[in-house]
Amino acid sequence: MIRTQNIDQIFCLTKNDFESKALEFYRHQAVHSSLYQKFIATLKMDTREISSLCDIPFLPIRFFKSHEITCSSVEKYDGDSKSIVFESSGTTGLVSSKHFVIDTLLYQKSAINSFESFYGRVEDTIFLALLPSYLERGNSSLVYMLHYFMQRGGHPWSRFYLHNQQELSTYLRDEKHSGQKIILWGVSYALLDFAETYPMKLQNTIVLETGGMKGRRKEMIREELQEQLMKAFEVSSIHAEYGMTELLSQAYSKGNGIFVCPPWMNVLVRDINDPFQVTMSGKGLLNIIDLANIHSCCFIATDDIGEVYADGSFRVTGRLDNSDLRGCSLMYEA
């Protein structure tokens, strides 16, 4: 059994410790996750031969749409920890992914540690969330995360906005909030709608987009999206979050579309034509290692196309052809 103190160790990992901890979690999930075990068996792989990150078999992300992916023999946190099922927002008519999270406290720890390592304490931040499609669907991991940030931060002005964009505009224009750090966190199409209707010069405000048009607007590459938002809000950069229902961790970009992972998350690259050709850097399809996913699967082969750099940062440039459009989808960049 993996105990809670071993799980807590992931939040203070060093770069040199990551591989050994990932291999430990791999060996555990190869035995205690029935679906992952079957997947490895179909590949006729010997788990004893896995000695590096690039050797690990990555579970195709589509299995989250068709199976309940859980891993036994992992100790939960005591106290207020509960279970929840997160469901992807997706696009109307498509099958959604489901992530069966048996320990919400682990998700909270992952989310807060990741966010604060990039942006500082949530207590010092006002969160304004423009996430209409996520609120409409329910069971969103992003809504859960931001609700947790708002609750923990305790700032009375933090709130979600569904259709009341005029109220959001009035708040952002109010000079009495000058000097306070604000994060306007929004899904791409809603931020564009807001920017077109209420362009303004933002002060002390970080605009953070979470990607996705949800079928509401034409897809566009991230550079075009961010250029429009920078012009409308007169800011020098647009920040972004890379997260998904199937992960319990998030990577963040402070501009230029370059994402950085927290210490317990890593991104690798697999060849588009050979899924078993995996490298630590380069261009191709993105494989994610998220050690916070110890209760489900830590090793996920996504359908996102991108580039991983030598320092571990990465860029998302599109989606694999013929894969379902998802909430975080972007148009392929030629």
Image (cartoon, helix red, strand yellow):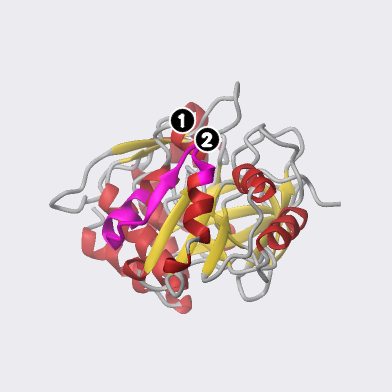
Determine whether, in the image, residue 295 is placed left or right of residue 180: left
Q: How many marks?
A: 2
How far from the left and from the top, in percent, is residue 203? 55, 69
The answer to whether residue 327 is above or below residue 8 is above
Near-viewer residue (267 or 130): 130
Near-viewer residue (197 or 117): 197
Task: Tell me the SS state at disc 2.
Answer: helix
Disc ID at residue 101: none
Image point 65% across, 51% down: which residue?
Answer: 195
Determine whether, in the image, residue 252 is placed left or right of residue 236: left
Mark pair 1, 2: CA separation:
6 Å
Q: Which residue is at the far left?
A: 79
Image point 20% across, 48% down: which residue?
Answer: 81
Magenta stretch: give its range: 147-166
Mark 1 packing: few (<14 Cα in 10 Å), some, or many (20+)? few
Determine whether, in the image, residue 70 is placed left or right of residue 47: left
Image point 74% across, 56% down: which residue?
Answer: 228
Mark 2 packing: few (<14 Cα in 10 Å), some, or many (20+)? many
The answer to whether residue 24 is above or below residue 135 is below
How far from the left and from the top, in percent, is residue 154? 27, 60
For disc 1, the marked residue is 137
The amino acid type, in three-letter code, at marker 1 is: Arg
For disc 2, the marked residue is 133
Image point 54% across, 50% down: which residue?
Answer: 186
The amino acid type, in three-letter code, at marker 2 is: Ser
Per the image, is 145 magenta? no
Per the image, is 150 magenta? yes
Task: Tell me the SS state at disc 1.
Answer: helix
Image marks 1 and 2: residues in contact by CB distance under 8 Å: yes
Determine whether, in the image, residue 140 is placed left or right of residue 81: right
